[in-house]
């Protein structure tokens, strides 16, 4: 493999793995706050990426999309996922309301990381000796990938986090009907991705989010 491609994989792999790892750890952390210690007992409330990595969603899919972009051109569009953190809502005092916050914790962690990467980029401007094209590429990718993961997960399709949040707000009868769509959720997301609809939804929202973050921290 060409050395430059390997360097790019490393530069982009660090923020990508952090994004999916902290996303899942956030779910487990908030679930523990509400009384469910399942994720904690399984060692999933950790920054160790090995505990969260899904060979397909965390490695093969993002790597394949990156290589397609590198060799075939076109806009870079990456997404991925980690092993879902097991959640047992029966341990919650208020399962519906508590699950809403457990679900929202993942996307919120990605928003926090996007802002964090942007702040690192801002600070690097004051450290010219450490500033390099590679570091700035990592920073930019960290912002864009986290925003992409946040927007993707907020789409109101079960089992995505946005679907779980929407479920928590629906009247009981509607929620039960909506819950039955979860078995088709992955297929729906896959079809949206293959047809380009998913990209058309995510890209403008990510561009808007990155613009707001840039304006907020002066980039």
Image: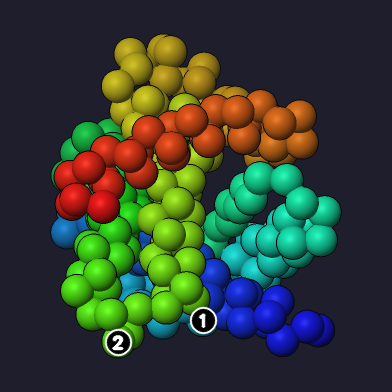
Q: Position of residue 160 (x, y in %)?
A: 49, 40
Residue at x-position 30% and y-position 22%: 169
Q: Position of residue 183 (x, y in %)?
A: 65, 35
User: Which quadrant would residue 109 be assigned to in this image?
Assistant: bottom left
Between 16 and 8, the residue placed more toward the observer is: 8
Between 187 and 214, the residue placed more toward the observer is: 214
Residue 36 vertical placement versus 168 (above, below): below
Which element type, helix, strand or loop, lies under badge 2? loop
Which is in the foreground here, disc 1 or disc 2?
A: 2
Q: Residue furthest front?
A: 128
Residue 50 shows which numbered tag?
Answer: 1
Contact (Cβ within 8 Å) of mark 1 with mark 2: no
Q: Is residue 210 left or right of residue 92?
A: right
Q: Position of residue 1 (x, y in %)?
A: 81, 84
Q: Which residue is mark 2?
A: 129
Q: Position of residue 187 (x, y in %)?
A: 72, 35
């Amino acid at each position: 493999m060409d050395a430059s491609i390997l360097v790019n994989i490393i530069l982009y792999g660090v923020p990508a793995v952090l994004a999916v790892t902290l996303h899942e750890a956030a779910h487990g952390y908030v679930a523990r706050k509400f009384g469910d210690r399942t994720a904690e007992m399984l060692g999933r409330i950790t920054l160790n990426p090995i505990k969260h990595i899904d060979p397909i969603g965390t490695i093969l899919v993002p790597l394949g999309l990156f290589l397609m972009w590198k060799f075939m051109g076109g806009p870079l569009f990456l997404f991925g996922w980690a092993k879902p953190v097991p959640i047992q809502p029966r341990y919650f005092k208020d399962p519906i309301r508590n699950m809403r916050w457990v679900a929202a914790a993942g996307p919120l962690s990605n928003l926090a990381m996007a802002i964090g990467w942007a702040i690192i980029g801002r600070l690097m401007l004051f450290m010219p000796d450490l500033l390099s094209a590679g570091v700035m590429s990592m920073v930019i990718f960290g912002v864009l990938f986290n925003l992409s993961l946040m927007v993707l997960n907020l789409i109101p399709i079960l089992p995505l986090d946005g679907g779980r949040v929407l479920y928590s707000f629906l009247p009981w009868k509607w929620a039960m009907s909506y819950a039955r769509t979860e078995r088709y959720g992955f297929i729906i997301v896959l079809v949206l991705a293959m047809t380009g609809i998913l990209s058309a939804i995510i890209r403008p929202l990510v561009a808007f989010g990155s613009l707001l973050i840039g304006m907020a921290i002066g980039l």
